[in-house]
Amino acid sequence: MAGKTTITIDGPGGSGKSTVARRLADSLGFAFLDSGAIYRAATWFALDQGLDLTDTARVLQAMDGLSLHFEQTPAGMSVFVNLVDVTGQIRTREVSNSIFHLANSGEVRSRLIGYQQAFAQDADLVAEGRDMGSVVFPDAPLKFYLMASLEIRARRRQRELEQVGEQINFEAIKEEILIRDERDSNREVAPLCKPEGAVVIDSSDLEIQQVIAVMTGEARSRGLV
């Protein structure tokens, strides 16, 4: 079909967006965009520079020296900040709990949206995040909103942290997820929400392949693949 197709997957942290989006992209032959990795990379960069993340002007100034590069690999999207591979570093608890400073800034978001939209210019794309269908790609022909129970999301987050060597109490992880949900849903700029027209999928009791099957069926029914 003519033109490029963008499929968006939004939802709260731990709903399985990244894993599902990556595998869906692979199965469809689309490119994959982990928008959260862009915010994580920018947050890691600001922390590494020793910046006060509440000082938006200083953060924006520092971002003039920020170069982001992404590579698709069988394991997912590798992230490079100024040619340094920070794929593991951006998944730490410190970064996760600090992202909201940049995410709440309209000026920072405007700067980073350019990185995200550039992905859709040259390839069919599966884009996942918290505002993909509502803000970054509002005209996407197919949008999904992926959700899961708090317990399931906390278990997934705990496994993710263990993979980067962090052992965190389960109840503490649940509390952090609740706090982040509150921040994401109530921020003034691009809050987490179900995009208009999005297909809602609860992944709590579904295997990854079952979620992908539902999404693939929707894409086929709309003639997108």
Image (cartoon, rainbow, N blue to C red):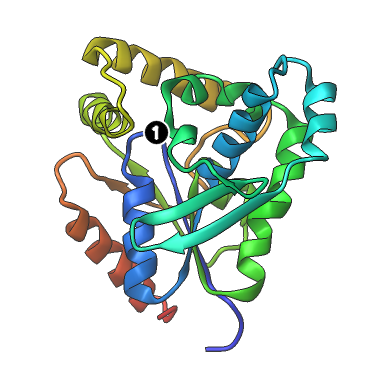
Query: Which residue is painted at 24% across and 56% down in the image?
Result: 211
Mark 1 surroundings within 10 Å by alpha-carbon count, few (fewer than 14), some (14 through 19), many (20 or more): many
Q: In terms of depth relative to the viewer, which is nearer, 103 or 77?
A: 77
Q: Quadrant for the C terminus, please.
A: bottom left
> Residue 212 at x, y = what percent?
26, 61
Query: Which residue is painted at 76% across and 43% down in the image?
Result: 111
Query: Which residue is painted at 80% across and 40% down in the image?
Result: 65
> Residue 100 at x, y = what percent?
58, 23
- Looking at this rendering, what residue extends furthest in the bottom direction? 1
Q: Is residue 123 above or below residue 32?
A: below
Classify mark 1: helix, strand or loop: loop
Q: In terms of depth relative to the viewer, which is nearer, 26 or 222?
A: 26
The residue to which callout 1 is attached is 13
Q: Please tell me in which quadrant of the rendered image residue 112 appears.
A: top right
Q: In terms of depth relative to the viewer, which is nearer, 7 or 141?
A: 7
Q: Please tell me in which quadrant of the rendered image residue 66 appears.
A: top right
> Residue 200 at x, y = what percent?
35, 49
Q: In terms of depth relative to the viewer, which is nearer, 75 or 111?
A: 75
Q: Say whether residue 55 is visible.
A: yes
- Tag 1: residue type? Gly
Q: How many marks?
A: 1
Q: Say whether residue 187 is visible.
A: no
Q: Is residue 85 above or below residue 176?
A: below
> Residue 64 at x, y = what percent?
83, 40
